[in-house]
Structure formats: structure tokens, C-alpha cells
Image (cartoon, rainbow, N blue to C red):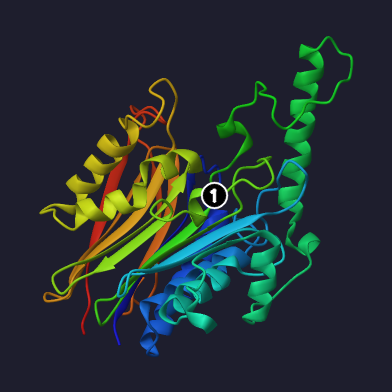
Amino acid sequence: MAGFVAVHTGAGNCIDETKYQRVIKEACVRATDIIKNGGSAMDACEAAIMRLENCGNTNAGFGSNLCWDGRVQCDASIMDGSNLHFGACTNVSTVRNPIRFARLLCDGQSTMLSMERIPPMVMAGSGAERYAEELGCAMIDASAMISSKAKFSYNHYKSKIATISSAAEGGNGTSIGMSTTAAVSTSQVSALDTVGAVCVDSAGNTAAGCSSGGLLLKVPGRIGQAATYGAGCWATDSTEVSVATCTTGNGEYLMKTLLAKEICGDLLTTDCAVTSLHKSIKNKFLESPFLPADQDLYAGALSLIYYPHANTGEVLWSHTTKSFCVGYMSTQQKAPKFIYSPLPTYSMPGRSCVVNGHNFHLRV
């Protein structure tokens, strides 16, 4: 059995890529082992993201950013390119691996519920948590999802915002509300280290998934791109070409542009994947009429394109942030490849993008 997997730990400003290098490689090895043993692209994608959710260094699953009220609320989604089914969860705090729940919701799209009820595709909050438990997902106490790293960041920036607010209000000690703007930018407050994976198996079927804890100090109840149809991930297969992508960055902007779906749509009709991805990021994100022209726009995308008749493909990554950590591995490789991708020094973060890629061949 042959296949290929690529994973990322988010587009942002990575100061120390070594904290991601090991877990990225472990995720790649775990996913390719599953494919070698007869697993599908969906199996591999889910397993890779679960490993990234469990490591504690990423903003997904255990270790996710904390909301304004100090709780973890996770988003995750996954899409099956073979049948275009999609599943997602949002604002879950007690599901050990949100991507597992998203996978079960995705698989559930194939079967009607009793009384011919349409099965849920996206679920949120306490109702989602109850349903996840019914489906057999591993559950955990909400406090156990909080890592020491996430708690430290939360306390640091909550204190910083309170200090700025107090100074602005004449030092009267009034606490800043979560709806109040303050002189601490999103790029300062939030490391955009969400996670994602794209996979293809020997049948030419693709899968794409993503998982995120959202912005640090986000308003409780906020839904991010990792749970939004068309924004966080997309996958679609045909006899001629299969494509998949997962995104990371400013969630609201990724949702407004449906960036994952747009990227895949462009890749399906291109003669040059690198050029296509560059145009997608430039024309449909950085220059999108749906987004503010006077703000820095942060995004990253990890994509693959595969041609079943030739058993060849290409993995691609692009970002408008200072850096992006990705990894990839085929079932033929002895070891995974880790890539630290910086934005060129002459480029402005949030205003320009970089695109790179690597060809692969599957011996099916």
C-alpha cells in the first residue's frame, strides 16, 4: 500500500522550530504506517492530527489557547475527498481529541438517523460533547486540557492588557472587558500554531483536516475557520486529479474568503500547481474585496495535488506570516522531511506570500 502525508503546525512567527520538528516527524511516521497497513487517507489524516493535538506545544487539543474566561474551546474539521463528506466540531472543551469527533461526524454523513433525520455535520458546545461521548470519543475534564504553556501565555497577556487599560483610564484600576480594544495586536497575543494535515492513499483518495484552539483570549463561543465548511480544509477527488488543502492564520479572514475551497478549486484546473497556489493566496486572500485593505493579513496553506494515472503528485505550502513549519513523508521514504519555511527578508509579513513545493511519486 502506498500513500503520502503532509502536516503543519501553523503559520506564524516561529522562534524555535525545534519544538515542532519532533512531533511533525512523529505525525508523519504514524500516518504513513497506517497507510502501509491498509488504512485510508482519512485514517492517516486523523491519526496525524491526533498526534499533533496531544503534544502540548501546538494550539490544538491539549495545550490550546485559553479563551478570555480561562477555558479551552476547540475547533476541528475533516473532509473526505472520495465522497466530499465533511464533519466538524466547535466550542468543545471535554473531547480529548476534537479531530476524532469530527471524523465520526464526517463518517456519519453516509447514514440517515432514525425517522429519516439528516445526520449532523457540524456540532457545538455541550450538545456536541454529549454526542461525542455517545459515539465513544475519549472524554476528559476541561481543566486537564490546559497546559502550563497555555496558562502562562494567558496570564501574561491578560495582565498586559489590564495594565494598558488601567493606564488608559487614568490608573483607576478598572478592568478591561473582553469586548474592549487595547494596544496589543492579535499577532502579539496569538501564536498561530494551529495544526493540519493532507493525505493521499494508493487509491488516489485524499483527505484534509485541521484542529485549533483559536485565538488566545478569544471571546468564549467564537467559531474559527477550523470548524467552518470551505475555510479550514477541503478535499476532492476525480479519476484525473485529486486535491486537498488545510489552512491556518486569521480565522475570520479565512472564513470570509473560503480560502481552502478556493485553493482546491484553482488547483483542479491548473497546469502549474505552484503558480496556482500563489495566485490563490494573492488574488483571493491578500487582495480579496472581502477583507480590509489597510490591515496585515496572515494566512498559511498546506496543499497537495495528485495524478492517479501517473502516480505522481506535488505537496505545496504557502504563507504570508514570518514562518511556517511543515513536514511530509511518502510510504517509500525511510524518514520524514521537516521544512522550516521563512518569509524572504525583503517581503512584508501580512502583505506578501511565499510558495514552495516538492514532487513525489507513489509506487502503487
The residue located at (66%, 23%) in the rendering is: 181
Residue at image position (32%, 53%) is 261
Q: Residues within 10 Å of mark 1 (few under 14, many from 20)?
A: many
Position of the N terminus, as image quadrant, is: bottom left
Q: Is residue 32 above or below residue 256?
A: below
Q: Is residue 257 left or right of residue 59?
A: left
- The answer to whether residue 280 is above or below residue 179 is below
* Residue pictured at 26% horizontal, 82% vertical: 202
The residue lying at 24 percent from left, 77 percent from top is: 204
Say if residue 113 shows up in the picture. Answer: no
| Spot occupied by residue 200 in the image (x, y as percentages of width and height) | 31, 73
Q: The residue tagged with tag 1: helix, strand or loop?
A: loop
Q: Is residue 173 visible?
A: yes
- Answer with left or right where residue 6 lies relative to residue 87: left
Image check: 147 left or right of 116? right
* Residue tagged 1: 193
- Front-most of 72 and 277? 72
